[in-house]
């Protein structure tokens, strides 16, 4: 009996704690792409907040844990551009070449993919949503700038005949989240979020989708506070049909 290839899902701590639906939706999509999904027990933060704050010692400790946890798997999928970039780009920089973990960090970086990159590469085609939906897409900074993720989520959304993809006027401008940036500089962050929601509203979309839970929480909160009738979601929730109502209302 032929078995499916196995893919490990690294859920990310933000999705686990704040939006677990993203993890379930991601698992559903990876399965639909023809893989058995494994969610290794003992996952924790990838160490990105520590790394970005200059605490390389704690970041190395978290990286070591994640490397050992994911080492047995051939494919590792992450529903976050920023966490995937931490593993793919920054983990190898945390260890000296003489350290045994350097080679393991490189190996993990080579087999780790952000969710939409993984789905696009394996030819996943979403089912048609039961209702026509107008969707805008927000690019996360890490996914766009560190991993070059731009066409993959758009290609997936365009494959669904029920979705109409609308482009923002400034899709590559940050939403103001930026990890600890929104805590350190709340006034600047708030203004950036205000500009982003205005850009989203101008498209006429009923839903704005994105690939990072950090951006999602930031934009969703701003939309709610402004009283805008626009639904924010992770692209995995939309593709997997896991929104309560597909038209976002």
Image (spheres, grey):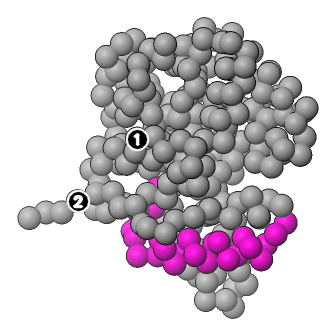
State the residue at coordinates (61%, 83%).
101
Q: Name the side, left or right, on which 242 lies relative to 177.
A: left
Dividing the picture into quadrants, the one containing residue 18 is: top right
- Asked if one can make out residue 148 in the rendered structure from this viewpoint, the answer is no
Mark 1 touches mark 2? (CB < 8 Å): no
Left or right: 244 with respect to 91? Answer: left
In the visual, does 85 lie left or right of 161? right
Q: Secondary structure at mark 2?
A: loop
Based on the picture, tell me whether residue 142 belongs to the magenta stretch: no
Residue ID at (51%, 78%)? 68
In the depicted structure, whether residue 165 falls above or below residue 39: above
> Which residue lies under the disc numbered 2?
4
Q: Position of residue 168 (x, y in %)?
A: 67, 20
Per the picture, the main secondary structure of the magenta-coloured stretch is helix
Looking at the rendering, the stretch of residues picked out in magenta corresponds to 54-77
Q: Which residue does the numbered mark 1 point to in the structure image? A: 25
Residue 84 seen from this side: yes
- Element class at badge 1: helix
The first of marks 1 and 2 along the sequence is: 2
């Amino acid at each position: 009996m032929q078995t499916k290839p196995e893919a490990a899902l690294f859920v990310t701590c933000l999705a686990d704690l704040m939006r677990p639906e993203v993890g379930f939706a991601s698992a559903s999509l990876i399965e639909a792409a023809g893989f058995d999904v494994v969610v290794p027990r003992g996952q924790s933060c990838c160490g990105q907040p520590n790394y970005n704050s200059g605490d390389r010692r704690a970041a190395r400790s978290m990286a070591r844990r994640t490397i050992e946890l994911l080492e047995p798997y051939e494919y590792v999928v992450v529903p976050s551009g920023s966490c995937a970039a931490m593993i793919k780009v920054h983990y190898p920089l945390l260890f000296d070449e003489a350290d045994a973990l350097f080679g393991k960090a490189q190996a993990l970086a080579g087999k780790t993919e952000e969710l939409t990159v993984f789905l696009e590469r394996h030819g996943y085609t979403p089912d048609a949503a039961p209702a026509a939906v107008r969707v805008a897409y927000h690019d996360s900074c890490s996914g766009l700038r560190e991993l070059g993720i731009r066409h993959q989520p758009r290609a997936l959304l365009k494959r669904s005949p029920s979705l109409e993809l609308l482009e923002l006027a400034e899709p590559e401008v940050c939403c103001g989240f930026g990890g600890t940036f929104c805590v350190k500089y709340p006034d600047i962050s708030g203004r950036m979020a205000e500009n982003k929601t205005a850009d989203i509203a101008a498209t006429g979309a009923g839903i704005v989708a994105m690939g990072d839970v950090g951006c999602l929480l930031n934009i969703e909160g701003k939309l709610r506070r402004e009283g805008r009738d626009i639904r924010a979601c992770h692209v995995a929730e939309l593709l997997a049909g896991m929104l309560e109502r597909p038209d976002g209302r």
